[in-house]
Image (cartoon, rainbow, N blue to C red):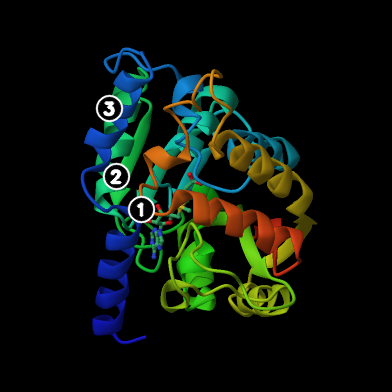
Amino acid sequence: MPSSDNQALSLALNAHYAPGDVSRRILAAVRAAGLDPQEISRDAAALFDEFHGGGRESTRALARAVGLASGERVLDVGCGVGGPARTLCAEFGCAVTGVDLTHEFILAAKLLSQRVGMAERVTFLHGSALALPVADASFDWVWSQNMLMNIPDKQRFAQEIRRVLKPGGRCAIETVVAGQGDILYPCFWAAEPALSFVATPAALRAAFSAAGLEEQSWTDTTALVLAHGQRRLAGMLPVPAGEAASAALGIGVLVPDRVLDKTRNAVRNNEEGRTLAVQSVWRSP
Ligand SMILES: C[S@@+](CC[C@H](N)C(=O)[O-])C[C@H]1O[C@@H](n2cnc3c(N)ncnc32)[C@H](O)[C@@H]1O
């Protein structure tokens, strides 16, 4: 892809993921929920800072499944506002660096890490998955949740993964892949098809294999993601008069535009088999 196309895609993704000041919106939502924005608990932040289908549960499930070990160096590519990075650091003892293309998300990731008391323990860098701002052979793990759907050239990303992994290092990905039938938009990762590059399982596997990565596991997690989406949707629908309004803290903190449509489509896409959720592990030789 020519660099002018890369630049156009980068601008479009920044506009998609961060309309407005993300950090300010987060702090306002925390205040509206009656919490102290100076000291935010990781549990409260997890209501919006794990920006993928299964939420914090799927981050934990993947980390347990691959046996992440304390002290291992993890690069979280497409780290968003840093929820998964903080989970891997706080609960699994990993040394995590997050990289994301959306500048506002990196600012929010740093702010949130400070407000949950982890500023010294996680590192966040602004940059692209296709030109990672880190040294060769410097990580035990590349970690990436729900970012691949924004990457047109999966093989190039897989080559970057190989470059930054130590020999024998591994890569754990969670992603949406194509099922049968057209995907319904808007989605969380793209409001329209132009920003969406959802691969079939066969195409994704071929791209990673062509870069020399060896497949270690491929697990369909659609049921877990669907259940999470259904709970999320139920929490967003209007509640009967007299009951408490749905919580101020939810994925809408990060997604101010058409969040109900995106949540409905996420559920329908999975329910109707238009998309599938996958967790997969790859090893660098
Ligand atoms: C759905 S969010 C997931 C965020 C995070 N992984 C999580 O699970 O909480 C997708 C993220 O991928 C990032 N992204 C998309 N394309 C990227 C690229 N080429 N390089 C780095 N990050 C990218 C977006 O900015 C966004 O933060």
- Who's the residue at 37% across and 17% down the image? 40
Residue 280 placement (x, y as % from top left): 70, 57
Q: Is residue 24 left or right of residue 101?
A: left
* Ligand 1 within 8 angstroms of badge 1 C-beta: yes
Element at badge 3?
A: helix
Q: Quadrant of residue 237?
A: top right
Three-letter amino acid code at the position of disc 2: Ile
Label 3, label 2: how far apart the Cα atoms are: 15 Å
* Ligand 1 within 8 angstroms of badge 3 C-beta: no
Residue 156 seen: yes
Residue 231 placement (x, y as % from top left): 66, 37
Q: Quadrant of residue 234?
A: top right
Q: Are circles 2 and 1 on residues that touch, CB within 8 Å?
A: yes
Most foreground residue, 76 or 150: 150
Residue at mark 3? 27
Residue at mark 1? 100
Label 2, label 1: how far apart the Cα atoms are: 6 Å
Q: Quadrant of the N terminus?
A: bottom left
Q: Is residue 106 left or right of residue 188?
A: left
First in sequence, mark 1 or 3: give its number.
3
Q: Which residue is outermost to the bottom? A: 2
- Who's the residue at 30% across and 87% down the image? 2
Residue 66 placement (x, y as % from top left): 71, 43
Three-letter amino acid code at the position of disc 3: Leu
First in sequence, mark 2 or 1: give its number.
1
Q: Which residue is outermost to the front? A: 241
Residue at mark 2? 106
Which mark, residue 134? none
Eyeballing the image, is 72 above or below 195? above
First in sequence, mark 3 or 2: give its number.
3
